[in-house]
């Protein structure tokens, strides 16, 4: 049985969780002129805090640029759940994989610990913060300062951060892949850009339920994945089991993959095996 990481069992994260290289993607869109100003221009290996000026004020992200990263490196943007922090997500072990494989990591901070994913969450949603614009600007900045390949930008998130990864992809973000854990779409997603999706969900998650929460405007896992299966031109799926995990895998056009990983008994928290699983399945 996959055990739960105590890091994301912290009460503030759970209480505030709104109680949510693939071939061929087009380059990530550039930030609109004047929408963001990078406080750090020259990039060298190491860790730093990158501040971007946005209409709502300064927005910060922890950037980890390992010495192994070369020009054309992939970028993985990891988004916390509601009430969490970028530092929380950094503790999940992504940095070790990034150092091994020469990948640049970004751990952005949501406004007041929240992301505007549509029908979730908190002040970011109520103030209609343009978090898609912020994340697009963050990726575009790192393309320029750190030599990231714009065709190899990935988004991973937990809960509200997972919802944000869907929202970014649904808004036409040219992402190579997304890895949402305990998330759902929370608004229209008529024509997402083709992208790989590795979605993890728990049968015991009483916050972001597999069957959805229509009273909050949160879609079921089936409805959430449907637009991506269409956009990716996926073939009939294959299903397998691995301990508590039931994996449904679709091979899709353009080298994309969609995976639905349903974990028996998993609640609203990050499974301890999720970090490596997402890294492998997304092909980072």
Image (spheres, rainbow, N blue to C red):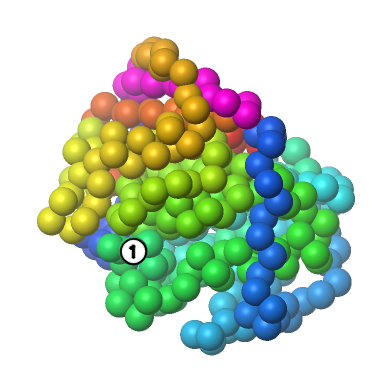
Image location (x, y in percent) of residue 81: 39, 58
- Front residue of 162/105: it is 162
Crowding around mark 1 (Cα neighbors within 10 Å: few <14, some 14 to 19, many 20+) is many
Residue 118, by quadrant, is: bottom left
Question: Would you place residue 265 above or below residue 217 in this image?
Answer: above
Rendering quarter of residue 45: bottom right
Q: State the residue at coordinates (81%, 66%).
A: 145
Q: Is residue 93 visible?
A: no
Residue 247 inside the magenta-drawn segment: yes
Q: From the image, which quarter does the C terminus lie in?
A: top right
62 to 233, vertically: above or below: below
Q: Which residues are magenta?
A: 242-255
Which residue is the site of mark 1? 118
Q: Is residue 40 visible?
A: yes
Residue nearer the viewer, 43 or 256: 256
Residue 219 magenta-drawn? no
Is 175 on the left-hand or right-hand side of 241? right
Q: Quadrant of the N terminus?
A: top left
State the residue lying farthest toward the left: 215
Q: Residue placed at 26% from the left, 27% from the top?
A: 264
Count of labels shown?
1
Q: Label 1: state its secondary structure.
A: loop
Place of residue 116 in the rendered image (x, y in percent of width and height, measured from the top left) = 39, 67
Task: Find residue 29 and report its horizontal and vertical position in percent.
Answer: 66, 60
Judge from the rendering whether residue 6 lies leftward or rightward of residue 29; answer left or right.
left
- Residue found 56% across the figure and 54% down from its top: 173
- Residue 106 percent across, percent down from the top left: 63, 59
Does residue 282 appear left or right of residue 152 in this picture? left
Give the answer, above or below, for where 136 lies relative to 203: below
Residue occupying the point 69% across, 65% down: 30
């Amino acid at each position: 049985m996959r055990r739960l990481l105590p890091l994301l069992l912290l009460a503030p994260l759970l209480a505030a969780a709104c109680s949510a290289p693939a071939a061929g993607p087009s380059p990530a869109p550039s930030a609109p002129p004047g929408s963001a100003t990078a406080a750090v221009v020259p990039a060298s290996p190491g860790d730093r805090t990158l501040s971007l000026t946005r209409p709502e004020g300064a927005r910060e992200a922890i950037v980890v640029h390992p010495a192994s990263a070369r020009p054309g490196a992939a970028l993985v943007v990891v988004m916390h759940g509601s009430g969490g922090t970028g530092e929380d997500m950094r503790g999940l072990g992504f940095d070790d994989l990034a150092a091994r494989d020469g990948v640049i990591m970004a751990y952005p901070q949501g406004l007041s610990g929240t992301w505007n994913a549509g029908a979730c969450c908190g002040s970011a949603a109520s103030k209609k913060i343009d978090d898609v614009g912020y994340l697009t600007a963050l990726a575009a900045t790192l393309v320029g300062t750190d030599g990231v390949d714009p065709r190899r930008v990935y988004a991973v998130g937990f809960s509200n951060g997972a919802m944000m990864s869907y929202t970014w992809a649904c808004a036409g973000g040219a992402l190579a892949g997304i890895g949402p854990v305990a998330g759902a779409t929370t608004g229209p997603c008529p024509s997402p850009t083709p992208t790989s999706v590795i979605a993890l969900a728990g049968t015991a998650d009483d916050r972001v339920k597999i069957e959805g929460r229509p009273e909050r405007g949160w879609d079921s896992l089936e409805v959430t994945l449907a637009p991506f299966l269409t956009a990716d031109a996926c073939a009939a799926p294959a299903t397998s089991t691995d301990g508590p995990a039931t994996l449904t895998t679709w091979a899709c056009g353009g080298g994309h993959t969609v995976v639905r990983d349903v974990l028996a008994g998993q609640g609203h928290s990050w499974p301890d095996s999720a970090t490596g699983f997402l890294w492998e399945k997304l092909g980072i």
